[in-house]
Image (cartoon, rainbow, N blue to C red):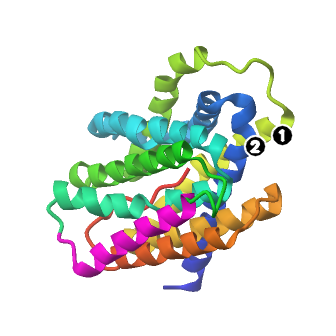
Amino acid sequence: MELKYWLVLTFLGAIWGSAFIFIKIAAPEFGAIGLVQARLIIASTVFLPILFRKKYLSLLKFSWKHSLLLAVTNNAIPFTLFSFGSFGADSNILAILNATTAFNTMIIAFFWLNEKITYKQIFGLILGFIGVIILVNPESSSTSILSAILCLVGATCYSFSTVFIQKYSQQTDKLVLIGWSIVFSAFIMMPLTLLNLPSQMPSINAFTAAAWLGSISTGLAFFGYVYLIEKIGAVKTSTVAYFLPIFGIIWGSIFLDEIITPGIILGCGTILIGVFLATSNKKSLSAGDIHAN
């Protein structure tokens, strides 16, 4: 793989890995639901000028049903779950738990797409869940069990979306599919947001964090993601999964002074080895093997 693609891949991992610190900053002031609404509205403003172009607008009629479903399973539900999860977990834990998407995808694809699973992948799956247990152990971190469960369910939603795209949307333009799913999810979240408005105006720091999440992590980063899929394929692009926990730990330590315990290092390392083993034989999933907040 050429150096320029490695640079884009690393940059993408750094951006998505940073999302979790901004969730930690903004969620307490916006509220979990309010933050999701804010980032979706901002991300929609990034996508809409492109989606309204004639060549993309004409493709909406072929993908709107898929985009609508993904608006729920790939955006509204997992974004909300990770936002709520941030109240009981450090940003580095959120990033590491997000990497479990790879395991869930393998399991769902086995039952839904009849994909074969090797013994090496099964071992990787077991190793990954051992890593999760290490990670949420009270002696390793201050993560609450509820927050861990919310993040794991959110990661499962991402996995479902990956397999759904693989099964039903092979011929759909991915920019149109992802872009409209974000716009639709902004409308879906609106009624719930109106019932959960923040009690006071969020601070400038919170607005800045929400702006980053919407415009960069949820908006701009997906353009880089689509670019890499077109240039190097989804299998190689999916290696961004290895960058997210690493950057999540780095950014959390630098900007939020989060403590990196031996348990976090051990849990993260165990999960990443498990992800490598579980996905090393995966060649058929092509619509997005990893998701990020």
Of discs 2 and 1, which sits in the foreground?
2
Q: What stretch is highlighted in magenta?
A: 116-136
For residue 259, the mark is: none
Question: Which residue is located at x 58 percent, y 43 percent?
Answer: 85
Q: Does the magenta stretch include residue 48?
A: no
Q: In this view, does 173 lie to the left or right of 219?
A: left
Q: Is residue 133 magenta?
A: yes
Q: Mark 2 packing: few (<14 Cα in 10 Å), some, or many (20+)?
A: some
Q: Point out residue 67 in the picture as x, y percentages from the top left corner.
A: 36, 38
Q: Point out residue 217 in the picture as x, y percentages from the top left corner.
A: 62, 51
> What is the tally of numbered marks visible in this picture?
2
Question: Which residue is located at x 42 percent, y 58 percent?
Answer: 101
Amino acid, disc 1: Asn
In front of the other: 214 or 117:
117
Question: Which residue is located at x 65 percent, y 59 percent?
Answer: 141
Amino acid, disc 2: Ile
Alpha-carbon span between mark 2 and mark 1:
8 Å
The quarter of the picture where residue 178 lies is top left
Q: Can residue 289 be seen in this view?
A: no
- The residue wearing badge 2 is 25
Q: In this view, does 89 lie above or below 197?
A: below
Q: Mark 1 packing: few (<14 Cα in 10 Å), some, or many (20+)?
A: few
- The residue wearing badge 1 is 205
Q: Is residue 261 above or below residue 16?
A: below
Q: Is mark 1 on a helix, strand or loop?
A: helix
The quarter of the picture where residue 190 lies is top right
Q: Is residue 192 visible?
A: yes
In front of the other: 28 or 146:
146
Q: Is residue 70 above or below residue 33?
A: below
Tell me whether circle 2 and circle 1 mark residues in contact (CB < 8 Å). yes
Question: Which residue is located at x 48 percent, y 62 percent?
Answer: 133
